[in-house]
Image (cartoon, rainbow, N blue to C red):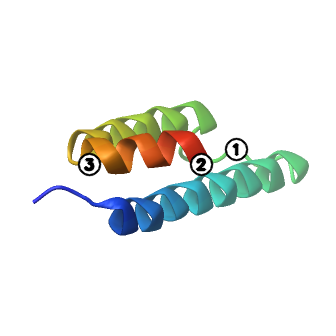
Amino acid sequence: MKFNIQDRILLDEMVDTFTAEMHKNQDDAELMDKRPIITREYWLQMIMVVQGKIDNFTTVKALEHSNKYR
């Protein structure tokens, strides 16, 4: 089963929220001169992989909607 528009809206929101929190945590670690276990670059790479997998399991209409409004 492929993700429809409602599914895709929820998944986009989850990915965007996770990305924002990751940036916040990385920025906080930099302010405290702490080195995070997982680097920002690795997180961004993994987010791109997950986003690609989500895109592959999304209907064409839902993907167009996501690209248009995201």
Where residue 4 sits, quadrant-wise, is bottom left
**Residue 18 in the figure: left or right of residue 26:** left
In contact (CB < 8 Å): disc 2 and disc 1: no
- Helix, strand or loop at mark 2: helix
Residue 64 in the image: state x and y as whole percent. Answer: 42, 40
For label 2, count other residues whose C-alpha is less than 10 Å away and answer few (under 14), some (14-19) or many (20+): few
* 21 vs 6, nearest the viewer: 6
Q: Secondary structure at mark 3?
A: loop
Residue 35's tag is 1
Residue under label 2, please give it: 69
- 3D distance between C-alphas at marks 1 and 3: 36 Å
Marks 2 and 3: which is nearer the front? 2
- Type of the residue with mark 1: Arg
Three-letter residue code for mark 2: Tyr
Q: Which residue was labeled with disc 3? A: 58
Residue 32: horizontal and vertical position, in percent?
87, 54
- Height in image: 32 above or below 6? above
Between the residue at mark 2 and the residue at mark 3, the CA separation in whole angstroms equals 15 Å
Q: Is residue 61 above or below residue 12?
A: above
Going from N to C along the chain, the mark reached first, 2 or 3, is 3
- Does dot 1 land on a helix, a strand or a loop? loop
Do tag 1 and tag 3 residues touch (Cβ < 8 Å)?
A: no
Number of the front mark, 2 or 1: 2
Q: Is 15 in front, or is 12? A: 12
Marks 2 and 1, the one that precedes in the sequence: 1
| Front in this rendered view, residue 55 or 67 | 67
User: What's the residue at 20%, 47% (across, down)?
Assistant: 57
Three-letter amino acid code at the position of disc 3: Thr
Residue 8 percent coordinates (x, y): 38, 59
